[in-house]
Image (cartoon, rainbow, N blue to C red):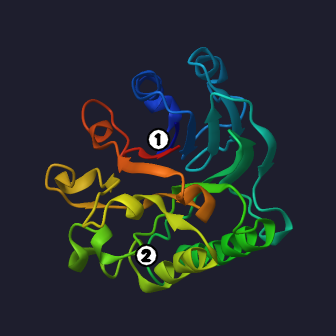
Amino acid sequence: MIKVATWNVNSIRARLERLLAWLEKASPDIVLLQELKVTDEDFPRDEILDAGYHAAVHGQRTWNGVAILSRSAITDVVNGMGDIFEDSEARVIGGRTHDMTVLSVYVPNGKTVGSDKWEYKLEWLDGFVRHVTQAFAPSERLLIGGDFNVAPEDRDVAKPEKWRESVLCYEDGRARLRKLFEWGLVDTIRLHNEGPGPYSWWDYRRLAFPKGDGLRIDHVLVTDVLAGECTGAYVDRDERKGQKPSDHAPVIAEFE
């Protein structure tokens, strides 16, 4: 079995102790990380290596930074989307490991609908759709995991009416995500759970987690060949509990 996880850790410095403990407990084969908030030089490679993982990192200060961790070597590493969409922010990294191509993705949040950051989010998503559809083929063993900052449907939102006009649920963002599904990507969670939920993110504010005000905005998407090998997919909700949690929980997909 191959276990693949995606996790927005919301600062690897703040969450390193939790991440290392989770790696030992959950024992994933591949982990796609987002929102590292460190440069490549400051990424804790020694600690990750001691935990048994190779690392490919596309780091950046402030809010960005993505990485791939794998128990096997990672080859053919590519940062960003090349000429298809030139981005100064570290939001995409891809590589080959465990007989598949994997991408760790951190989609812009968008802040508020109608703002400049919202327009950037839509442009970014358009660029990412072009990148996927031009750089890969639906017949490939391709897995894309990350924080998409989009809840695909109302069943992915605990309180749909509250969030309907937000940047996480607005139709323009959902329409971009559907283009990836139409091209040939499959949502692993929906292979095994019709919903509502499970949810992967809860705001730190207003007691969102204890009140159950969650959204599913973190996804593991795969092409058909991997979908046929997917034996399970779930959210490790316990990682949102306890001391110093990320506001996101890991999403895990398992394959034959």
Q: Is residue 238 above or below residue 21?
A: below
Neighbours of disc 2 within 10 Å: few (<14), some (14-19), many (20+): some
Residue drawn at x 86%, y 68% is: 83
Instruction: Locate residue 148 relative to residue 158 in the image: left or right.
Output: right
Q: Earlier in the sequence, mark 2 or mark 1?
A: 1
Name the amino acid, label 2. Thr
In this rendering, is residue 28 above or below 133?
above
Number of marks present in the image shown: 2
Answer with left or right where residue 75 lies relative to residue 174: right
Give the labeled residue for mark 2: 112
The kind of residue tagged 1 is: Val
Label 2 vs label 1: CA separation?
A: 23 Å
* Residue picked out by circle 1: 9
Front-most of 210 and 70?
70
Give the farthest residue toward the left: 211
- Which residue is pictured at 29% across the width and 44% down the height? 237
Instruction: Note whether residue 106 is visible.
Output: yes
Name the residue rendered at 41%, 44% in the picture: 250
- Residue 147, given in percent of the width and then of the height, sits at 50, 56
Q: Quadrant of residue 222?
A: bottom right
Q: Position of residue 36 (x, y in %)?
A: 56, 41
**SS type, badge 1:** loop
Q: Which x, y percent locates residue 240?
A: 30, 41
Residue nearest the observer in this picture, 172 or 225: 225
Helix, strand or loop at label 2? It is: loop
